[in-house]
Amino acid sequence: MTSLRRSIRPEQIRELILILVILALIAFFGSQINDYFSGRTFTRISTGLAILAVVAVGETLVFLTRNYDLSVGSIVGFTAFFVGTQLSVYHSLPPIAAVLLAVGTGALMGAFNGVLVAYGRVPAIIVTLGTMAIYRSLLVEYPGNKIVQISALPGWVQDFSSANVLVLGDFELRLIVAIAMAVVIVFQLLLTYLPYGRRLYAIGSHPEAARVAGFPSQRIVFVAFVLCGALAGLAGFMFLGRFGNLTVVAAIGTELQAIGAVVVGGASTMGGSGTAIGTLLGATLIGLLDQSLRRWPIISEFWRDALLGLLILLAVAGDMAIMNRLRTLWARSELQLGSGKSAAHREDSIHGS
């Protein structure tokens, strides 16, 4: 039992519980909705959560530093609309250039947030609440038509939402889902193995200790906001490819779902805790509920939003109650293990003398 506790972290138990909750919900909705266990349902749910997962991974980086970014929804909407208007005019713009344009635009918006938070020392919730309105206003005041029509976009954009990378019978793995999976894997590896990822945890867990250790905290926080904006920009391109027809209210409310996915996935609101895999599981749970409740006729749209809010509250309460209890048990186990080793060492010393 002791060896098991040493090899498994409390956060991994939380992720396992989240997987079990997702499986339980799938079984429940499968008993309530006709033809639920089908390839079409998988495609609908997976494509619905792909954009959310990419935005939420960027939000996770900011969460790890004890900050928030409420402007991600506006960044997604602006980049989708901006790139869409450019593609409507310049049909010869290659796909890679369109992606880089979206990512670069999002990164610039994230950098503006990062400068104010990291170097200006303005609270993140104040900065991003303001830029959320500013970026949305830029979208509303953007010159030209206030709508992007899919018929005016290049053919490769029109085919983006239905492009597959793998087909197994009725199950289709869409390109948009593969992109989201790649983002999760890359940033999970970054957080696990690269020095920058470990420093994010250090800053969020013990800001003062990180400062004493000589970590460039301001630069690390700034880069986190830049990466968050860049991923929101990528999500904006994916949003354009999935929906095509856009208005100035594109992606409104995405920030709430992204924060919900991050919190439900296990990231602590106090920083220093969270993973990209956990965020993906949180996005999966939210996407599963959203798409399934849409097909469950006894639930209204109001209750879908209410359930999302309830889910966030339960996740925060669970993190404070259950996870603190688990961490206490793990710490007590380590303390008992250390005491046992010390006693054994003293006994060996006595016998040896």
Image: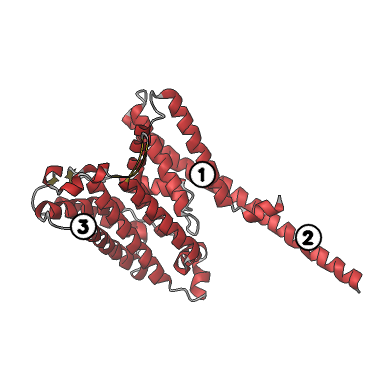
Q: Residue at 44% of width from left, 45% of height from top?
A: 282
Q: How is the image coloured?
A: secondary structure
Q: Secondary structure at mark 2?
A: helix
The circle drawn on residue 317 is 1
Report the residue marked by disc 3. 98
Q: CA distance from mark 3 to mark 1?
A: 42 Å
Q: Of callouts 2 and 1, which one flags the residue occurring earlier in the amino acid sequence?
A: 1
Foreground mark, 3 or 1, reads 3
Along the line of sight, which residue is nearer the eye, 347 or 213? Answer: 347
Q: CA distance from mark 2 to mark 3?
A: 61 Å
For the residues labelled 2 and 1, say whether their Cβ atoms are less than 8 Å apart: no
Q: Quadrant of residue 113?
A: bottom left
Query: In this rendering, is residue 100 above or below 292?
Result: below
Mark 3 is on which residue type? Ala
Q: Quadrant of residue 276?
A: bottom left
For the residues labelled 2 and 3, say whether their Cβ atoms are less than 8 Å apart: no
Q: Position of residue 44 (x, y in %)?
A: 33, 36
Mark 1 is on which residue type? Ala
Foreground mark, 2 or 3, reads 3
The circle drawn on residue 340 is 2
Q: Position of residue 54 (x, y in %)?
A: 35, 51
Q: Is residue 290 shown left or right of residue 319?
A: left
Along the line of sight, which residue is nearer the eye, 229 or 44? Answer: 44
Q: Position of residue 174 (x, y in %)?
A: 32, 44
Q: Position of residue 10 (x, y in %)?
A: 58, 51
Q: Is residue 4 shown left or right of residue 69?
A: right
Q: CA distance from mark 2 to mark 1?
A: 34 Å
Q: Secondary structure at mark 3?
A: helix
Mark 2 is on which residue type? Gly
Foreground mark, 2 or 1, reads 2
The C terminus lies in quadrant? bottom right
Q: Residue at 40% of width from left, 68% of height from top?
A: 220
